[in-house]
Amino acid sequence: IAAGWYCTEDGKTTSVAHWLEEDDFRSNGGVMNHETIESISKRRKPFTVDYTGFGWLLIKKGVFEHEEMTYPWFAPKMQVFESGDVQDMCGEDVSFCLDAKEAGFEIWCDPRIRVGHEKSRVI
């Protein structure tokens, strides 16, 4: 699974992120630590991430056929942290990344591939 990246609507962070631990979630209310534009601009080689937005994504044949990747592949779900005390509803992109990682797939981001992503404006 490979991705490029794009700027998020705040203009400071990107579409790729790393999961936070439960304690981090409790303290900041977010489940992900997004790469900033500054940090990703310093990278020169592809690197692994825990999450990527779906604005530019390549999924190789075999991912969907893998026995641990169950249909529907793109559906929101409740993310439950290890203790069971903290839960977060996540969208279809986060859900897919969680499932893919649990099935043993790596998600790669190539920092040299920056794309636009159309929302209410192209970011």
Image: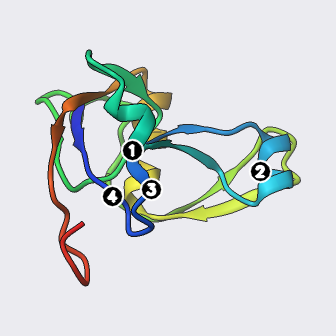
89 displayed left or right of 26: left
Give the distance between the C-alpha atoms of the residues marked 4 and 1, in whole angstroms: 27 Å
Q: Residues within 10 Å of mark 3 (few under 14, many from 20)?
A: few
In the depicted view, which residue is nearer to us: 38 or 4?
A: 38
For numbered disc 3, what is the local secondary structure?
A: loop
Whether residue 12 is visible to the viewer of this picture, yes or no, is yes
| Marks 1 and 3 in Cβ contact (< 8 Å) | yes
**In front: label 4 or label 2:** 2
The residue shown at (78%, 56%) is 28
Name the amino acid, label 1: Ile
Look at mark 4 in the image and give the residue it sits on: 74
For numbered disc 1, what is the local secondary structure?
A: helix
* Occupied quadrant, residue 104: top left
Look at mark 3 in the image and give the residue it sits on: 12
**In front: label 3 or label 4:** 3
> x, y (%) of residue 71?
32, 52
Q: Residues within 10 Å of mark 2 (few under 14, many from 20)?
A: some
Give the distance between the C-alpha atoms of the residues marked 4 and 2, in whole angstroms: 24 Å
Circle on res. 25: 2
In the depicted view, which residue is nearer to us: 40 or 79?
A: 40
Nearer-N-terminus badge (2/3): 3
The residue shown at (38%, 69%) is 9
Name the amino acid, label 3: Lys
